[in-house]
Amino acid sequence: MCGIVGYTGKSDALSPVLEGLRRLEYRGYDSAGIALPTQPGEKLWIEKRSGKLGNLEGVLGDAVPKSHSGIGHTRWATHGGPTDKNAHPHVDNEGKLALIHNGIIENYVELRNELEKRGHVFTSETDTESVVHLLSDARKSHNGDLAAAMRDVCKELRGSFTLLAIHSDDPERIVGARRNSPLVVGVGDGENFLASDVAAFISHTKRALELGQDEVVDITPLSITVTDLNGAVLPHNEYEISWDASAAERGGFPHFMLKEIYEQPKAVADTLIGRTHGLSEEITAGIDLKAITKVVIIACGTAYHAGMVGKYAIERWADVSVDVELASEYRYREPSIDKNTLVIPISQSGETMDTLMALRYAKSHGAKIFSVCNTNGSTIPRESDGVLYTFAGPEIAVASTKAFLTQLVAMYLFALHMGRVRGTLSPELDAQLAQEIAELPGKIEQVLETVEPLRELTRKFKDSTSMLFLGRHVGYPTALEGALKLKELAYMHAEGFAGGELKHGPIALIDEGTPVIAIMPTENSLLNEKMASNVQEVKARGAIVIAIGDADLPSATHNIRIPHTHEFLQPVLAVVPLQVIAYEMAVARGNDVDQPRNLAKSVTVE
Ligand code: F6R
């Protein structure tokens, strides 16, 4: 969703604010804007433009005033189209108070009606603008105390938000607040930062503070004060950011996505370190895995596909029934939950609103929560009983790649652990799986060494209107993930099917020349032959079949070989060529690979 940055300190603020926005642009990119105080008590200097950050940068020129503080925003539109007027920051009618926002203010219509009656003039269609007018009035009633005003305003808001505000009367101060939306503080030396994500300030400081739900933070260059909504001062929970600035840079690759695809062996290896022979007790703290009678995995998009693979592994290795649920649907059907239900939210960002809401629902109904997450200090792990962190590092491309692979291995690690605790794994299978899992990073490396011809082959299908993906067993979620990647990046019709389901309807989609990607189950597995028959069925109807597997399929038009592994682990290897196909197709079709249209990373609205 939207990217938010605030800076106050010794430097000329434009530079850290713009740098922060560049690093956060992956969160939203349909407009961008900046507010800088110039002279105390004067109107703020504001510039905002629809389109990518580059449009804003293009109009900045030399006329930008020097300022030691400022706020900046990149937007993913919810209320009101992506126009200059709807871009943030929004200002009060005096032009002295500016506000940026991520999230949705659900009661904005009633607030707006009330504020208009009080004489406030609105200039945008956004939900955010109501908040700046409300804050302006509250600040006056608090004799200019912006933090006190923010606390009052938050009490009146419904919905989710990260808010940052700055007023020209007190130009060194920036006040922020959060509810169900991320905000972190970067602690500098004579300078401080606020941002939706540590990536914004990572080149300036590695010290960060977590902010909790309904907390207000007030920063100046030399002070940081965190309070609850009643004004009680709260202790700081500081942590050190474990990755450095280069992790958030392209490092010679043409796109972040390609860089992240090539980082997968390391991401998986980092996630496995010290874990293949068991998870430490801290990770599953307080959860009696022997007593669990049902597991429910909740996630969205790519993370949901990792959950689907997890279901196969947990059911087989830990002998417990597993449901995988789209987080956005889960709570609305009021599922049956009890204290022996283990709910596993999977989320790269740890901030996905659909997943968070499903987690809270499950927790309030007595379930134990064990999350899988890539972002230290984010909301989902903080609200869980146990957490298994993945170590993919920052994922900047909007389409998830390396985070997905680490989610897959996290599911295997957990399934293995649960099987051991419950005594449902034979020692032979346990040893074989631990060994095969440990070998995955090297095998991903091998896949990456052989993808060049696939890139060339993909370009031949550049003008296709549709591509279908088939898989069986764990190959089915792999097929779904391949199709999702292609939709996101190539803006092309793509669908994933279970191979056996094809004949029940979808086979009607096959036409002369339709490209079909078949994820072949491992050689000699029970399903390999069945899938080979499904390939024959589509070939007979004119499909061009690209088979991905650990052995060549003679009936396929093209074969892409991946190393052999245990059949349950195959998605980790088979999905890599699918990522490459989506990447290459997007490049061939001239699309923006890292920031595909209409999308945003970290979806913090429901
Ligand atoms: C697709 C993609 C999304 C995310 C989904 C969940 O490439 O990135 O489908 O997987 O929005 O995000 P997290 O994992 O942050 O909860």
Image: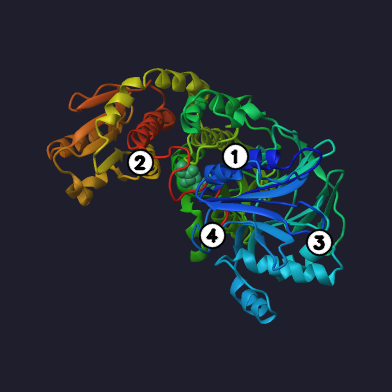
**Which one is nearer the viewer's eye here, 536 or 152?**
152
Give the crowd class for mark 1: few <14, some 14-19, many >=20 residues within 10 Å.
some
> Could you tell me if residue 276 is visible in this image?
no
1 vs 2, front mark: 1
The type of residue carrying mark 4 is: Glu
Give x and y (percent) for residue 242. Answer: 70, 30
**Which one is nearer the viewer's eye here, 379 or 553?**
379
Q: Is label 1 in contact with label 4 (beta carbons under 8 Å)? A: no
Does the beta carbon of the residue at mark 4 sit less than 8 Å from ligand 1?
Answer: no
Mark number displayed over residue 146:
3
Q: Which residue is mark 2?
A: 490
The type of residue carrying mark 1 is: Arg
Does the beta carbon of the residue at mark 1 sit less than 8 Å from ligand 1?
Answer: no
Give x and y (percent) for residue 48. Answer: 59, 53
In space, the residues marked 1 and 2 are separated at their CA atoms by: 23 Å
Give the crowd class for mark 2: few <14, some 14-19, many >=20 residues within 10 Å.
many
SS class of the residue under badge 2? helix
At x 35%, y 41%, the residue is 490
> Could you tell me if residue 147 is visible in this image?
yes
Looking at the image, is mark 4 or mark 3 earlier in the sequence?
3
Number of numbered labels in the structure image: 4
Look at the picture and state if 203 lies above or below 61: above
The type of residue carrying mark 2 is: Ala
Q: Which residue is mark 4?
A: 606
SS class of the residue under badge 3? helix
Give the crowd class for mark 3: few <14, some 14-19, many >=20 residues within 10 Å.
many
Q: Residue furthest front?
A: 63
In space, the residues marked 2 and 3 are separated at their CA atoms by: 46 Å
Looking at the image, is mark 4 or mark 2 earlier in the sequence?
2
In space, the residues marked 1 and 4 are separated at their CA atoms by: 25 Å
